[in-house]
Amino acid sequence: MAYRTIGKAQPRVEGYGKVTGQTMYAADLPFEGLLWAKVLRSPIPHGRIKGIDTSRAKALSGVRAVLTGADVPNVYVGTRVKDQPVLACDKVRFVGDAVAAVTAESEAIAEEALTLIEVDYEELPCVNDPLEALKPSAPLIHENRDKYKNAPKLPEGMSGHNLQSYVVWKNGDLEAGFQRAACVFDHTFRTPLSHHGYLEPCACTVHVHSDGRVEVWAANKGPWGLRDQMAEDFGVPKENIKVHIVNVGGDFGAKASLIDVPVAYHLSKATGRPVKLVFDSTEDILAGGHRHPAVIHLRTGVDNDGRFTAIKATIHFSGGAYGAQKANPQVTVLGGRRLASMYRVPAINVETYCAYTNQVPCTQTRTPGSPQIAFALDSHVDIIARELGIEPLEFRRRNILRDGDLSPMGEKWNHILMSEVLERAVKASGWKKGGAKKNRGWGMAFYERGTPEGKASTAITLEADGRVNILTGVPDVGPGYYTISQQMVCETLGLPPERVGVVFKDTDSLPFDPGTGGSKQTNTSGHAVYQAAREVREKLVNLAARELGCKPEEIKQDGNKLSAPNKKSTTTEKMIALAVKENGGPVFHLTMFEPKDMPKVTGFTAQVAEVEVDPATGGVKVLNFTTAHDTGTVLNHLTLTGQIDGGVITGLGFALMEENSMIDGKIATLTLGDAKLPCIRDLPPLKTILLETPTGPTPFGGKQIAENPNVPTAAAIANAIADACGVRLFELPLTAEKIYWAMKREKETTKVT
């Protein structure tokens, strides 16, 4: 179907403000009577607080409040499980744990006050490895996990020693599957702690007014969720809390929980003035949310025809000192439920353990848990293929899902396009054309993800000059949702983009928005916008029919032109102006969307990497990278390809360089430079292939795209490295040092043999 606006590469609605520096973020906002806050953080990973002396800090000129855990006792916060104190009371559990907080007339005074606080610690043994943490001999991080509100229930008889959560996903007869197997393969993989890599550190301002009203301006992607968490954790009626929507300078999953807001809230409550708390980048890496390190053990059965019979996965995530930042009800990492979801697996069992450890708390990170699991799974698949003597591409062709198959977890999806996506990726990449080349290799990997749904609200305002404004509750975090919502309204009403604006306000302005994240925005808030636009269009058509003297069903729309057979025509703009005139002012139309009978579809990704490995150093150069996607209808090619490119780069960093390594319980990489985020010089030529079919659940038939591209990248590169130099790495990142020593060991083993 031909569209006027949908599918076009429309420029970003918010782009001009960003490139000119006019866009304001949470740290930029000015306030009258503002106080600055700073937080004193633990220098040790685990210990008891024997005493805190704040007297010198309180005496410093310009200091307005100093708080410790004794001032906010028994106040625990969390998105689901309430296990994190606002300020540590009896013990600290990671380097960076908040011990005391200061607010003062200036940032400099607040920083000076921190140096005047004296804390006496009794150090305790610490544990960082999730497998070690669950042993009864490990130091106990939380003396009684079950006391916390919403603590996940554990199966009867299971020890809760340092266990944040336990979840199992399963389908089919696992024992029978392994009995049918001709060969069984066991491998274990590891992935590291890493930061999200957003540019804007956590920042907020909170003002607790004398009448009990609370206002919040925070770098948070879920304003309604933030409001509801504050109401629950602080005992404030949610109608007394207003969260102002602000631009967010990058997120990737980290900015959905309270993080810095509780400290600012209690300091403002103590002083009655607005309090601003802004992390610097080092503090953000020290205390902000991170991606979960993982240990993934896979056991897989394969029959004589090279087809899967069963997969048993045991996954251990290091959850950090608190589970407070996890958003799902199980307080776990959900990637395990999609393990092998691109393949036909008749029996599967996935156990996920999330352990308390003495490290920074972890949270959802772009496709939570899936990059870790995809690295393990498709590396495992490659190993199996090679040990069976089957070319990895052929092995995958035998095992991928095809239309009509059930997923490993028993889900029935419409329009399964995994085979088509795979073949497009193979063709576009030139898979192994020209034969083997010295020190060069090819690798591939897959991913699958559906498009989450949920309720949302939006409003459209008709203005006297014929313009339209969309009122949204979505904070801009970068993907381009404002532009997509503008395009949907333009397409529905026949208006050009310059006649449709997008505005955002606060949690009082709309009933609800789920917040951005989880690749769901176009399928939640987008549906609300699309529904509102169609309802407004119906009103305008009825008005046009009255003016033209015909029935509404006779009205035909061609762009902004509304006409009827043998009648005069009018325009959308004229009908908007008339509606405003008859209303006596702007027309405000509010819509609430709630999903019903959404199609059961998903989207597939196939990626191919071509690499070269330097045999002298182990250095890896990614020569070419191809990513193919089943996208449904593409609503905006510019924003979609931007999301894909960004996702691939995120995956490349995860594969080759990113790691917040810990030494003696402390993060050793406290700048983004030390953490080695990829830059432009690290990037290979990127080739993007889109399989467009109007089969998606979003308005106009689109599918989610934001998180798919970053998931299979590490596995594709790992498989290409193994193909290039003959050594297999089981731990990320795939650094030159690891590859060099693996090649050296392989060479020495070959000599001995």
Image: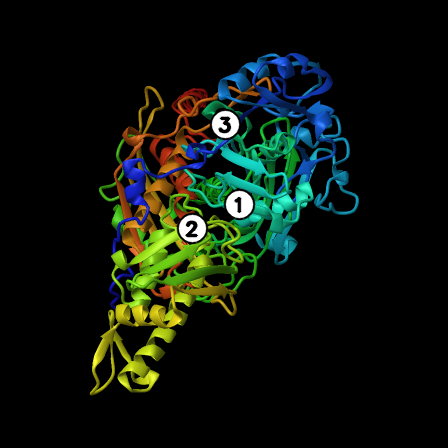
Report the amino acid beneath label 1.
Val
Q: In the image, which disc is placed on residue 512?
A: none
Query: Residue 197's spot in the image, x, y percent?
Result: 43, 32
Q: Please tell me whether residue 109 is drawn above or below residue 140 in the rendered image.
A: above
Q: Earlier in the sequence, mark 3 or mark 2?
A: 3
> Would you name the residue on which mark 2 appears?
504
- Which circle, 1 or 3, is nearer the viewer? 1
Report the amino acid beneath label 3.
Phe
Q: Earlier in the sequence, mark 1 or mark 3?
A: 1
Query: Residue 486's spot in the image, x, y percent?
Result: 33, 57
Quadrant in which residue 561 is drawn:
bottom left
Report the amino acid beneath label 2.
Phe
Nearest the viewer among 516 and 139 is: 516
**Which image quadrant: the C terminus?**
top left
Q: Residue at x 40, y 30 (%)?
A: 656
Label 1: how many residues lie within 10 Å, few (<14), some (14-19) or many (20+)?
A: many
